Amino acid sequence: MKNKIKIAPSILSCDFAHVYDEVKKIENSGADAIHIDIMDGHFVPNLSIGPKVVSAINRSTNLFLDVHLMIYNPFEYVEKFIEAGADLITFHFEATEDVADTLNYIKKCGRKAGIAFNPETSFSLALKYLELCDLVLIMSVHPGFGGQKFISSALEKIEMAKNFKDDLNLKYDIQVDGGIDLETGAKCKKKGADFLVSGTYLFSSGNMKDGIEKLRSC
């Protein structure tokens, strides 16, 4: 039986004036996780939230916290976000020269570890790290801002990630983030994605539970 696809609403698209209510809305929607983007204003041209807000979100829910570090030198921040409640930490391949060390350290701390790839980065560069990954994140927009249009070249990367996973008998999730709606979600699933992050589509759907159910079945 094929595994049910996982769905994580991106908290970046929520109303932060009512973040507790937004977290509860996600929790009641049947989502598998909350995707939390951390931006430093250097690796990406935007700032978002830090460990204190992640900790507040963690105190508000029992949902799995999927923390996506869009920051340089992610190794230095691993402990802070684990202490804040991260269950999975994903960092960017492009943001550090210590990819293997960072993956190993996250796992040594008892959390799941993932690496993310910008649209311009060749997925073939990931090959030597895949056995260390619990998740690989294919960015289908340029990281840093919500509401962008899906970049179709991500579909080829998803297919490559699926082929490597099958050929090497690996267990990582293939996550896609950026411009995910019913149309693009269906394309990603067809290529082998098993974990979709969606912000604008889910938060503007009016009924998040219904939006998630539609995304699962698209």
Image (cartoon, rainbow, N blue to C red):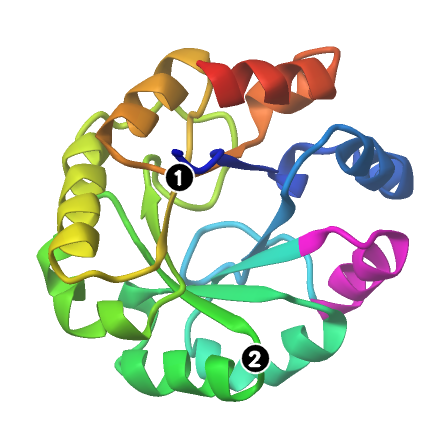
The three-letter amino acid code for the residue at tag 1 is Asp
Type of amino acid at the residue the image marks with label 2 = Tyr
**Mark 1 or 2, nearer chain start:** 2
Examine the rendered structure and indicate whether residue 18 appears above or below residue 103: above
Magenta residues? 51-64
Report the side of 156 relative to 91 (left or right): left
Residue 120 can be seen, yes or no: no
Q: Nearer the viewer, residue 113 or 52?
A: 113
- The question of residue 61 being in magenta is answered with yes
Query: Residue 169 location, x and y as percent?
Result: 20, 61
- The residue depicted at 71 percent of the width and 20 percent of the height is 208
Where in the figure is residue 203, as x and y percent of width and height?
A: 68, 23
Majority SS type along the magenta span: helix
Q: Secondary structure at mark 1?
A: loop
Residue at position x 52%, y 66% in the image: 89
Q: Quadrant of residue 109?
A: bottom right
Q: Indicate the secondary structure of the residue bearing disc 2.
A: helix
From the viewer's perspective, is the residue at label 1 or at label 2 nearer?
1
Q: Can see residue 182?
A: yes
* Image spot of residue 2 (x, y percent): 39, 34
Left or right of 153: which side holds 205? right
Name of the residue lying farthest toward the front? 1
Q: Residue at x 14, y 62 (%)?
A: 168
Q: Is residue 126 magenta?
A: no
- Give the crowd class for mark 1: few <14, some 14-19, many >=20 residues within 10 Å: many
Q: CA distance from mark 1 to mark 2?
A: 27 Å
Residues 18 and 209: in front is 209
Residue bearing the label numbered 2: 77
Asked if 176 appears above or below 209 in the picture, the reply is below
* Residue at figure coordinates x 18%, y 42% from the top left: 157
Task: Tell me the quarter of the image containing the C terminus.
Answer: top left
**Disc 1: which residue:** 194
